[in-house]
Image (spheres, rainbow, N blue to C red):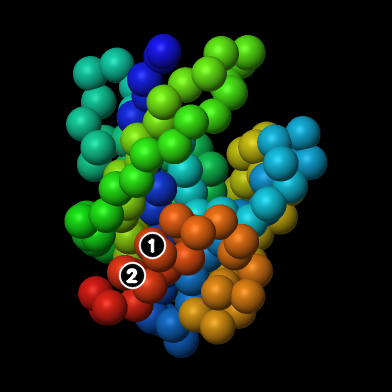
């Protein structure tokens, strides 16, 4: 079985008020809401992957801080026709100000949400656990 390492990163800002960014995948990719997610590429470390994925999926390059949430989980998923064993490492990314987002072709919509709004919209168990860890750390 092919193994793949991924990152998951919630982006947030405290200015002008506390908001969390979530992205909606296009229907062909499931149509669900999620934080920034993506696979580690060859010779990248996890932090480099977070920075690259945040930029690719949102256009954000001005990162204030990145925090490892000390949470990881595994699952299996079919990718490109093959069953893969995935391991995701979770982070949070703080930016200075809420900003407009430049979505990649993986997503069709985004929202800057309060904690309660994000909790209502997110459906995947590990996204919700990661969200709770974010709230405990800030």
Nearest the viewer among 44 and 115 is 115
Q: Which mark is residue 19?
A: none
**Which residue was labeled with disc 2?**
134
CA–CA distance in space, label 2 to label 1: 6 Å
Tell me the quarter of the picture where residue 89 sits.
Answer: top left
Q: Position of residue 15 (x, y in %)?
A: 41, 81
Q: Position of residue 97 (x, y in %)?
A: 43, 72
Query: In the visual, does 17 lie left or right of 69?
Result: right
Task: Tell me if I can see residue 94 in this picture.
Answer: yes
Q: Residue at x 58, y 23 (%)?
A: 78
Q: Residue at x 53, y 49 (%)?
A: 58
Q: Secondary structure at mark 1?
A: helix
Q: Residue at x 63, y 13 (%)?
A: 81
Q: Position of residue 53 (x, y in %)?
A: 43, 39
**Which residue was labeled with disc 1?**
130
Query: In the visual, does 131 lie left or right of 102?
Result: left
Q: Are marks 2 and 1 in contact (CB under 8 Å)?
A: yes
Query: Is 49 drawn above or below residue 66 in the view shown?
Result: above
Query: Is 125 drawn above or below residue 48 in the view shown?
Result: below
Image quarter where the C terminus lies is bottom left
Q: Residue at x 21, y 31 (%)?
A: 45
Tell me the quarter of the picture where residue 22 sits.
Answer: bottom right
């Amino acid at each position: 079985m092919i193994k793949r390492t991924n990152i998951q990163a919630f982006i947030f800002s405290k200015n002008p008020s506390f908001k969390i960014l979530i992205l909606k995948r296009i229907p062909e990719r499931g149509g669900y809401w999620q934080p920034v997610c993506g696979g580690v590429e060859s010779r990248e470390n996890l932090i480099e992957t977070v920075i690259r994925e945040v930029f690719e999926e949102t256009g954000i390059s001005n990162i204030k801080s990145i925090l490892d949430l000390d949470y990881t989980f595994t699952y299996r998923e079919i990718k490109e026709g093959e069953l893969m064993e995935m391991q995701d490492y979770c982070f949070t990314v703080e930016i200075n100000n809420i900003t407009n987002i430049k979505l990649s072709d993986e997503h069709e919509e985004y929202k800057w949400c309060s904690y309660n709004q994000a909790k209502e919209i997110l459906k995947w168990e590990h996204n919700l656990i990661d969200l709770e860890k974010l709230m405990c750390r800030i």
